[in-house]
Image (cartoon, rainbow, N blue to C red):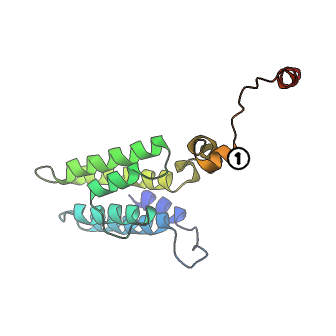
Amino acid sequence: MADIVGSLKKRMKKGKKDNGEQPIDRLTFEGLVALRAKLAADPSTDFSGEFSKIIKEFFHKLLKLRYQPTYEELISEIAGRRFTDEMKKEMVDYLQEMIHLEFSPGGMSRPKLVEKIGEFENLVIKATSDSARPHRAQNLTSAHSDSLLGRIFHPKKEPSTDSKHIMEEISE
């Protein structure tokens, strides 16, 4: 347990953003480190509610929402956001598992909570990396090819019927 907490603390030594706020992943990892410490110190208390708050706060900040979302609302918000399909699937699958575990009879067992915390740490790392969002340049041509700007900047070549133009295209 101590080695996990130590490795998380090392990851959190990123510094602050330019606007003075801490990065989302750092805030989340600080909350997870504190939660792991509470789990180790008090084995009889159920901390699944606190873990749920950390998850929702992370997605609240990641998606820049103006309300406190439920898991279901997070799933629908993720579907409409610009993440890679793989990342969307991973986030939605995780949230659906959390819904199932949180609202199952008997709640979430302690070993399952520890397992889910570890999975969430990996999800935070992936979701905040540059590879989680598709590259803008790749999507401009495909996403906007039928829009007005897409037709202006990426015009489709129309087949020419003039024999002079046909000969020029063949010689190119």
Residue sitting nearer the eye, 54 or 136: 136
Residue occupying the point 23% across, 60% down = 48
Residue 59 to residue 78: above or below: below
| Residue ranking furthest to the bottom | 20
Q: Is residue 101 left or right of residue 105?
A: right
Residue occupying the point 17% across, 63% down = 44
Residue 130 to residue 37: above or below: above
Residue 166 location, x and y as percent? 82, 22
Residue 115 to residue 18: above or below: above
Q: Amino acid at mark 1?
A: Phe
Image quadrant holding the C terminus, namely top right
Name the residue tied to disc 1: 153
The reply to whether residue 172 is in sight is no
The reply to whether residue 92 is in sight is yes
Image quadrant holding the N terminus, namely bottom left
As helix, strand or loop, the secondary structure at mark 1 comes to helix
Give the number of callouts. 1
Residue sitting nearer the eye, 108 or 94: 94
Residue 115 location, x and y as percent? 32, 49
Residue 111 location, x and y as percent? 25, 50
Residue occupying the point 23% across, 51% down = 99
Residue 86 location, x and y as percent? 46, 41
Q: Judge the density around disc 1: few (<14), some (14-19), many (≥20) Cα neighbours within 10 Å.
A: few
Q: Residue 2's image quarter?
A: bottom left
Residue occupying the point 33% across, 44% down = 93
Residue sitting nearer the eye, 146 or 26: 146
